[in-house]
Amino acid sequence: MANFNIVVDEDQQWLLNCLSATLDPNHEVRSFAEASLNQASLQPGFGSALSKVAANRELPLGLRQISFFIIMGLGSCLFISAIVFFALFFVFIVLFFYKENVKQMRAAVLLKQFIKKHWHEAEEAFEHPAVSSDEKAVVRRLLLLSLDDSHRKICTAISMAVASIAAYDWPEVWPDLLPYLMKLINDQTNMNGVHGALRCLALLSVDLDDTVVPTLVPALFPCLLKIVSSPEMYDKYLRTKALSIVYSCISMLGVMSGVYKTETSALIVPMVKPWMDQFSKILNHPLQSEDPDDWSIRTEVLKCLNQFVQNFPSLIESEFMIIVGPLWQTFMTSLGVYVRSSIEGTEDPFDGRYDSDGAEKSLDSFVVQLFEFLLTIVGSAKLVKVIMNNVEELTYYTIAFLQITEQQVHTWSMDANQFVADEDDVTYSCRVSGALLLEEVVNSCGTEGISAIIVAAKKRFSESQREKDAGSPIWWRIREATLFALASLSEQLLEAEDSELTRVGSGNLLEQIITEDIGLDVHQYPFLYSRIFSSVAKFSSVISHGVLEHFLYAAIKAISMDVPPPVKVGACRALSELLPETNKVIIHPHLMSLFQSLSDLLNQASDETLHLVLETLQEAIKAGYELSASIEPIISPVVLNMWASHISDPFICIDAIEVMETLKNAPGCIRPLVSRVLPYVWSVLNKPQQQPDGLVAGSVDLVTMLLKNAPIDVVKTVYDACFDTVIQIVLQSDDHSEMQNATECLAAFVSGGRQDVLAWSGDLENTMRRLLDAASRLLDPDLDSSGSLFVGSYILQLILHLPSQMAPHIRDLVAALIRRMQSAQIAGLRSSLLLIFARLVHLSAPKVEQFIDLLVTIPAEGYDNSFVYLMSEWTQQQGEIQGAYQIKVTTTALALLLSSRHAELAKINVQGYLFQSAAGITTRSKAKLTPDQWTVVPLPAKIMALLADALVEIQEQVVAGDNQDSDWEEVEADNVELDKDLMYSAGVTSSGRPSHLEAIAKAFNKINLANYLAEFFVNFSQSERQMFDHIFQSLTQDQRNAIQMVRAL
């Protein structure tokens, strides 16, 4: 323990009195003390004074912790109102007395916030005033001297403070930090100091970069190895903390190995054998029951091993065999502990518990890490051979880990929503991790892996049958785990069946398992029955029709019966997957009862289960289109009510609208559905200020759904009821969701009504003026970007469907688009506006130069003209544009611009390539000191590079075998001519017919981008040979190769 004295002078005594008074039950006393501290915080030295209180071990622990809280929350000259301080302080008092662990986490967050705001002026979140250099030195010194504090909570808080400050000051301003920590680690007479130093280094090691690790590892790792290899001297906590530092350093070395392969190998090779020896010793002992410290140290060992295997498989291959036996010992003994603790619940699994540093110490987290390491081994081409001889045993024991735990049985029985959520989401659990391991076994081991899965499943099924016959109450768990394993691998197993490379027999095995349990009592075994339903759906293609029909009828029946919720969940899952593939003749007689049952179930369901029921209902409607007219009166009122009552839940609203949309698309349903929905939404939209949050935006979304692909008479009906109110929302609302949905709705009105939308009101000019007013507000540069997010699609519909009316406003529209783009804070908005300009380029073809002339005459703030700004922004954003349609439109538009040969192109310089940074890895600190720097290139060169990049990407898709989504096909002359004709058909004037313009919009989806680019490069290289050759030399090798490939065809 550090031996230093802190003299309590008059000022210190005043501070102590204030701190004590903040705990006084008298409100006036507390308020006066808080106000006094608030005033004191404005004075220099306040932070160091509080640090002295925190470091004074003669003071009560409570006062020291309070001082830490104030350092974290108020800090040196941290301005905060007395009210806010009191609120934060009250939270602290509650947490201090009732929730110690939560308090620590909160304190750490506040401390990091303080340091970010006031310690370093280069920090983005910095706020004045800054802590002075002298005061920083005092704080750093006191923190180091306090690292060996005997109170773990104080020590943890100090370590966090040291690590936060070190991110700014170490090593340049704080060179003695690491030597001091090393001194503490090596002092075996001061275990508190060892603890504090290890805790501090564990936090520091997370943010180490390539400039520190190479010098740190040789000095630090021998000390860490000594700690890990000395269980008689250091307890498991300290050894675990030492291993966590090893893990962080090895992880960083792995990142460095991509740049510094030779240097990292030189560091790794000497440490492989000694560390592998220690890892094997720790893993070789049987896993201990109810011993979270044992689980924690093994977890860190597995994390370290995982980094070695992932980053340095060749270097550890020769030493890896020493790990295999101990690893298998840990795996085997873990199963017994896991079964007793988690599955049977006879021992404590320490779920949801954490150590004093906030690290999870549960058995479940250890098993998940074990599976992660095994998955890494199986996925390693060099190491998978190690387990090939034992792959059947690996899969056999893994299936046992997949059993439902006692805690899951309890939770899922009480909460069906949690059951659905855990089944749908890839949650952090042994079941999910084990299933991922089995999937990797199949992927890496091929037919041997599949055979191992089938053999293991058969063994587990036989065992469960014997347990069932013997009267075991938990026989069903291993049966359910077996089905879960098979269902998790359904895609791979069915693919193997189809390939006929091996006789898998998964269908026969599954039928054998499920038919054995046909007569089960669903009330006694709800989770097994639920798993049977979902498994049948997964393997429907290889199950006999008789068995399939039996479980289809059973699922329909279960929906209407009084059975446990998990059974209904399984039935819904089965129906949602089986109904699309079921013979309609077979299912038809049962649909009316199914619709009624699902409607009743909607009134009982909530949250996650509601999603599932709505999904099932949607598939049932699709399966019963012939009955649509008769089911609409049953379904739509219930779904509409469900939508309205869950308007605050966007996911449920989306599901409900999708169900109504499916119903709308069914024969004979759209008009009765519209007549049912419109009165409700009309009442909402006509009194928007009186509605609860979300209802107006949701109602507009519902109107948009009704408009999509609707007959013209339905569009007219919706127009009469809602058009005026939707316009008003765009013009008057400040709610972003309402504005976004109303913008999409206006686009749907224009798309569905076309020219007729102007005539329906009886005043064409007034309607057009209102549409333009809406566009004007959405393009207001002062409007928040979120409110304008979907303006692009709206403007595009106006241009496509009202071309003659929009023609006189093109110049003003372009100017407004430029202003809106310059003020946009959201990348998605900028991309959507760029898409409009791309379409305008196409619409101006073959006279693209006239559109460029227009842009040149329009000013843009900070640029010579709008064309200069547009091309600067476009060339930067092109690589970020998402979606096949958007990429085609913008890429081909760039080609048209370059083909125009306009003189303005050569006058513009834009952002080129990113300068390569100095050697090494770019860390956060390096990025702050040396921000990205770019070359400047002529616009034609940049456009040609972007077109070449598009070609490279398409060709890479082919090489990767991703032909399904690839635009790259063999270039044939006929196809090139077709694509060229399609592109030049876009060159219509504003007098073009709306129907033709809509056809043009659809034509883009038919364009083969690879063929188009190939034709462009061939023509451009011939017509502009000198320019082409000059630009070609500035391209990268990959870009040149891609162009040469298409030119050679």
Image (cartoon, rainbow, N blue to C red):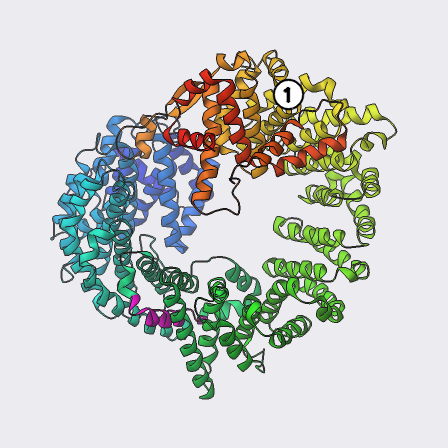
Q: Is residue 608 visible?
A: yes
Tell me if residue 943 comes above or below residue 952 in the rendering: above
**Of 580 and 30, which appears nearest the observer?**
580
- The image position of residue 272, as x and y in percent, is 17, 53
Q: Position of residue 1041 (x, y in %)?
A: 40, 31
Q: Residue at x 80, y 48 (%)?
A: 674
**Which one is in front, 356 or 205?**
205
On the picture, is 288 further left or further right than 572? Answer: left
Q: Is residue 971 above or below residue 535?
A: above
Magenta-drawn stretch contains 883: no
Comparing 854 with 947, the one in front is 947
Q: What residue lies at 72% left-to-right and 31% top-to-bottom? A: 997
Q: Which residues are magenta?
A: 388-406
Q: Main secondary structure of the magenta part?
A: helix
Say whether residue 156 is left or right of residue 797.
Answer: left
Furthest toward the right, the residue is 762
